[in-house]
Amino acid sequence: MRTRYSVPLKALGVTAAVGAACVGYAAGYEVRSFRLRRVEIPVLPAGAKPMRILQVSDIHMVNGQRKKQVWLRGLAALRPDLVINTGDNLSDPEAVPQTLDALGPLMDFPGAYVFGSNDYYGPKPKNPARYLSAMLSGNHGLNNADGTARRGIVGAVHNPWTDLRDGFDAAGWVDLTNRRGRLKVNGLDLELTGLDDPHIRRDRYQAVAGGPSADADVSFGVVHAPYLRVLDAFAADGYPLILAGHTHGGQLCVPFYGALVTNCDIDRDRVKGLSRHVAGGRQAYLHVSAGCGTNRYTPVRFACPPEATLLTLLPRDRA
């Protein structure tokens, strides 16, 4: 006999089955479905040869992630002119050797890097509701309720980030931790201005302020987390391009809607990919990588595949 509960219970069962299938897809397939995106950006001087930059970000390496390591090593086949690493390489204090091994072939090319909070501190289990709360309150990152910065991460495990730094430095990659760096790429004098991670208030823009150097052919900014205060500073100082990561593209997205959260104060529409940022009457291109990893305690992605990006910089006269 059919009861008045049968339809709701059936609907609940269907909903549960769909939910389980989505979780299985997000954790079992999409999180390992690595992609390469290609983007063109007209920021070079007129007549310059195109410059191919491979941006890798948010690797969040954990011991045993063999497929990710193989995929990263294979990116060297692209033979980029330059590699930019925008941080959060680790999600396991023991994974420095695996990370350096996976990036080894890419370190044969000129490169530069900044670090993110997960390079300095080991991961901790997190309540997903914290991100939704941050979205509603506007209080992002490691801040107190009044918006002032906390000092350190209570109870956090310190990663051996200096070993990672030493490996990058030994390969000749340029450390952009609140620093400027110069490289000669395709005959152009390239200036890079980088910041430490704004998500944990380690950025010191005053140490690199002043805008692009007059003798550089092209300059751009590099930072892990695309917080608005940092984007405003870079754009207002006249940098034509800013590269960032951190957001994971939202990580869990809704088809035809997009990201639910950004894990910083940037708007959801610019959570990944190429956009523009205007500040101080000046405009910069902004590229935010969705990254190729996840925190080890939230190893899922949905409608947001892991990625690296091959950025082709073109002369402005080809825009």
Image (cartoon, grey):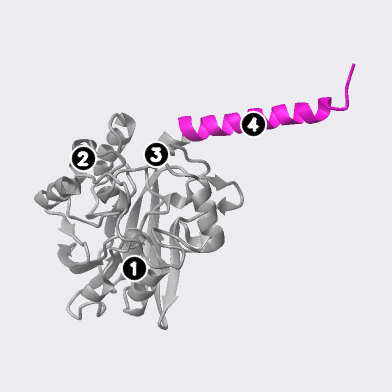
At horizontal 48% and vertical 62% (from top left) the residue drawn is: 139
Q: Earlier in the sequence, mark 1 or mark 3?
A: 3
Helix, strand or loop for disc 1: strand
Q: Earlier in the sequence, mark 4 or mark 2?
A: 4
The percent coordinates of residue 38 (x first, y second) are: 39, 52
Q: Earlier in the sequence, mark 3 or mark 2?
A: 3
Q: Earlier in the sequence, mark 3 or mark 4?
A: 4
Residue assigned mark 1:
241
The amino acid beneath tag 3 is Phe
How far is the residue under mark 3 from the one under mark 4? 24 Å
How far is the residue under mark 1 from the one under mark 2? 30 Å
In this rendering, the label closer to the viewer, 3 or 2: 2
The amino acid beneath tag 1 is Leu
The amino acid beneath tag 2 is Val
Residue assigned mark 2:
96
- In the image, which residues are magenta? 1-29
167 relative to 29, above or below = below
